[in-house]
Every structure is written in structure tokens, then in C-alpha cells.
Amino acid sequence: QVQLVESGGGLVQAGGSLRLSCAASGSIFSIGGMGWYRQAPGKQRELVATITSGGSTNYADSVKGRFTISRDNAKNTVTLQMNSLKPEDTAVYYCYCYIISFNRAYWGQGTQVTVSS
């Protein structure tokens, strides 16, 4: 199977930065897209950013210009650099990866990001 382990969440003041990392391990033969979603209390999970194996990126409008997603295909990791954080960025952040050989997505356990005003 495939496991995703996230790290880097925490508490930060508005305007600050955090860096989230996610490492995939297990029976991985080929990874397609990777990315991050988030879920705030009382809200549905929403897309934050995605990145293809070729490096093409896609961002939610709310984070464009502030967040940057990157990946290391050799290490099966995906990173989300979050700058100029706002209180509305407070949520549990989940990483995911799509395993082509299994034709399904896998999710991390989530990491809490809290931005104080």
C-alpha cells in the first residue's frame, strides 16, 4: 500500500509563513498528480494547489501569489510554501497523490494550520 506523511503545520501570526511537506512511501511505481487540499471547520474540503508529474501547477484563486507548490519526483515528496498567511487560511491541510498503477488517490492524515490575527 501507499502511505503519506505530512509535516510542517502549526500556529503562525497573520503575515507569517509556513512550509508543509508530504512524503509518499510504499508500493509506488508511478505517481501522477500530487497536491494539497484543506478543510476549515464547518466547511467542505477545498483544493489549494496541485502539481503534475511534469511540474504544471494549479492554484485556488484565494492562494495565488502567496502559496507555491513544488515536488521532488525522485523522493516522492510534495511541498507547499505558504507566505503572507491570513486567518482565513486556518484549516486542516491534506496532501494527496494519485498512483497511476493503482488508479486511485491516497491521502495524508492532515496537518493543522492556524493563523492568528
Image (spheres, grey):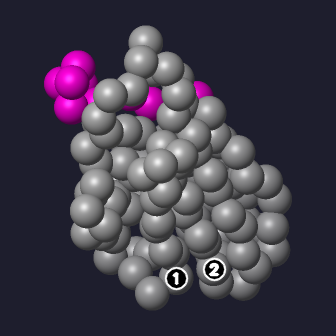
107 drawn magenta: yes
104 in relation to 54, above or below: above
The N terminus sits in image quarter: top left
Is residue 111 left or right of 70 when viewed as pictured?
right
Location of residue 56 in the rendering, given as x and y in whole percent from the top left corner: 26, 69
What is the crowding at mark 2: few (fewer than 14 residues within 10 Å), some, or many (at least 20)?
some
Residue at disc 2, secondary structure: loop
**Residue furthest front in the image:** 74
Location of residue 72 in the rendering, given as x and y in whole percent from the top left corner: 49, 56
Location of residue 33 in the rendering, given as x and y in whole percent from the top left corner: 28, 48
Q: Which residues are magenta?
A: 99-109
114 in relation to 13, above or below: above
Q: Amino acid at mark 2?
A: Asn
Confirm whether residue 107 shows in the render.
yes
Q: Are marks 1 and 2 in contact (CB under 8 Å)?
A: yes
Residue at disc 1, secondary structure: loop
Q: Which residue is mark 1?
A: 66
Location of residue 64 in the rendering, given as x and y in whole percent from the top left corner: 40, 81
Q: Which residue is mark 2?
A: 83
What residue is rendered at 63% in x and 79% in y? 83
Is residue 87 left or right of 16 when viewed as pictured?
left
9 drawn magenta: no
The C terminus sits in image quarter: bottom right
Confirm whether residue 41 shows in the render.
no
64 in relation to 57, above or below: below
**Residue furthest top in the image:** 1
Is residue 89 left or right of 54 when viewed as pictured?
right
Q: Amino acid at mark 1?
A: Arg
- The one nearer the camera, 39 or 5, is 5
Is residue 70 left or right of 99 when viewed as pictured?
right
